[in-house]
Image (spheres, grey):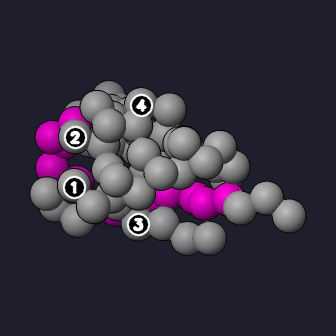
Amino acid sequence: EADYMKFFVNDSCIGCGVCEGMCPEVFKMNEEGVAEAIEEEITNEQFIDNGILAQEECPANAIESEK
């Protein structure tokens, strides 16, 4: 079974764009100027690693994840 991860952006997001810059495959800025994560489960190891890095770098601690 492949490893997968799902990311979420919570209401703490300040719209700084760090996550999109680090992992545009998973995060994007929406029309409200805050980030959102793709809705699919991510199985690509590189995207997972980049998503976790973005999660660690988020200044607002707005990124959550679950396996």
Q: Position of residue 17 (x, y in %)?
A: 22, 36
Earlier-in-chain disc, 1 versus 4: 4
Q: Quadrant of the C terminus?
A: bottom right
Earlier-in-chain disc, 3 versus 2: 2
Q: Residue sitting at 32 percent across and 50 percent down?
A: 54
Residue 12 seen in the current view: no
- Measure how far apart labels 1 and 2 are at the Cα level: 7 Å
Q: Quadrant of the N terminus?
A: bottom right
Res. 24 mark: 4
Q: Residue sitting at 42 percent across and 45 percent down?
A: 50
Q: Main secondary structure of the magenta part?
A: loop
Circle 1: residue type: Cys
Please name the residue that numbered disc 1 is placed on. 58
Is 44 in the magenta? no
Circle 3: residue type: Glu
Q: Residues within 10 Å of mark 1 (few under 14, many from 20)?
A: some
Q: Residue sitting at 32 percent across and 37 percent down?
A: 22
State left or right for residue 59 relative to residue 53: left
Q: Position of residue 51 (x, y in %)?
A: 43, 50
Q: Residue sitting at 41 percent across and 66 percent down?
A: 64
Please name the residue that numbered disc 2 is placed on. 18
Viewer-closest of 58 and 8: 58
Cβ atoms at labels 3 and 1 below 8 Å apart: no
Circle 2: residue type: Val
Cβ atoms at labels 1 and 2 below 8 Å apart: yes
Is 15 in the magenta? yes
Q: Residues within 10 Å of mark 3 (few under 14, many from 20)?
A: some
Q: Is 52 situated above or below 16?
A: below
Q: Position of residue 34 (x, y in %)?
A: 26, 41
Please name the residue that numbered disc 3 is placed on. 64
